[in-house]
């Protein structure tokens, strides 16, 4: 028993490191997993309506794979992905920009609203053309699982990457006037007296 004012002894040999935790649990990989919904309320509603877990719906819709629709050229599909991703990424940049004025200080709290609206509008515009890729991860995931649509799959990688790059350039150098500032400083140094 340790009395007040006395300290117990502590030795480094008293501490034992816990075993290392694996990044992936191999046992989890062998278990079957149901088709996923992020929102359990949606899954519950679909289950009650007897629309969840029916393979016929999955097969009828092509497994969610993004494909270039019949009647559209590769250029049209690529353009749809570039423009759709540009709209989404530019909306994200604009609605979360920390350099907005003080009068717009409430805007970051509402950022999900314009971002969700942009996703909705992009889906309305591009579902008939490409199935709306705008996310390379979801495009490749569905293609791997369903083993389909590899002919023009590059569209769903190149289009979003180009759209994101154009949106970044547009936001940084045009909307934020980075180019105007740089041009203004260049002109101020070259004025003729």
Image: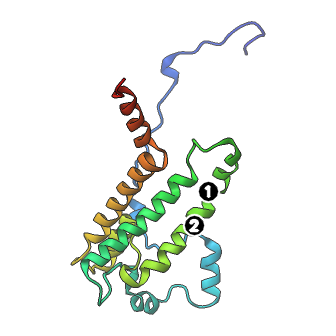
Q: Which mark is residue 53?
A: none
Q: Where does label 1 land, which residue?
A: 111
The residue at which mark 2 appears reads as 116
Question: Does residue 34 appear in the picture of this structure?
Answer: no
Chain-order first, disc 1 or disc 2: 1
Residue 9 location (% of width, % of height): 60, 12
The residue sitting at 48% across, 20% down in the picture is 13
As displayed, is residue 132 above or below residue 5?
below
Residue 142 is drawn in which quadrant? bottom left
Q: Nearer the viewer, residue 48 or 166?
A: 166
Q: Residues within 10 Å of mark 1 (few under 14, many from 20)?
A: some
* Residue at (73, 13) in percent of width and height: 2
User: Dot 2 lies on which element?
Assistant: helix
Residue shown at the point (44%, 93%) measured from the top left: 56
Numbered label tally: 2
Residue 29 in picture, x, y percent from top left: 39, 64
Element carrying mark 1 = loop
CA distance for labels 1 and 2: 9 Å
Q: Is residue 38 visible?
A: yes
Q: Quadrant of the C terminus?
A: top left
Relative image position of residue 132 (x, y in whole percent): 41, 75
User: Decide: marks 1, 2 in contact (CB < 8 A)?
Assistant: no
Q: Is residue 122 left or right of residue 45?
A: left
Label 2: few (<14), some (14–19) or many (≥20) C-alpha neighbours in 10 Å = some
Nearest the viewer among 190 and 81 is: 190
- Where is the N terminus found, in terms of image quarters? top right
For residue 178, which quarter of the picture?
top left
Residue projecting furthest to the left: 151
Q: Residue at x 34, y 26 (%)?
A: 192
Residue 67 coordinates in the image, percent (x, y): 32, 81
Vertical comparison of 107 with 51: above or below: above
């Amino acid at each position: 028993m340790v009395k007040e004012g006395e300290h117990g002894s502590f030795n480094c040999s008293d501490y034992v490191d816990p075993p290392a935790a694996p990044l992936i649990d191999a046992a989890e990989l062998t278990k079957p997993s149901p088709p996923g919904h992020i929102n359990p309320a949606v899954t519950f509603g679909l289950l009650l309506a007897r629309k969840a877990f029916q393979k016929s719906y999955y097969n009828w819709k092509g497994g969610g794979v993004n494909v270039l629709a019949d009647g559209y050229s590769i250029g049209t599909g690529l353009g749809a992905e570039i423009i759709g991703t540009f709209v989404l990424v530019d909306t994200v940049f604009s609605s979360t920009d920390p350099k907005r004025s003080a009068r717009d200080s409430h805007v970051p709290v509402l950022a999900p609203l314009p971002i969700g609206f942009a996703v909705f509008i992009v889906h309305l515009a591009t579902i008939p053309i490409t199935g709306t890729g705008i996310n390379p991860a979801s495009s490749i995931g569905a293609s791997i699982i369903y083993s389909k649509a590899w002919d023009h799959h590059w569209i769903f990688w190149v289009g979003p990457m180009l759209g994101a790059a154009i949106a970044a350039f547009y936001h940084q150098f045009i909307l934020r006037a980075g180019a105007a500032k740089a041009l203004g400083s260049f002109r101020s140094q070259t004025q003729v007296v």
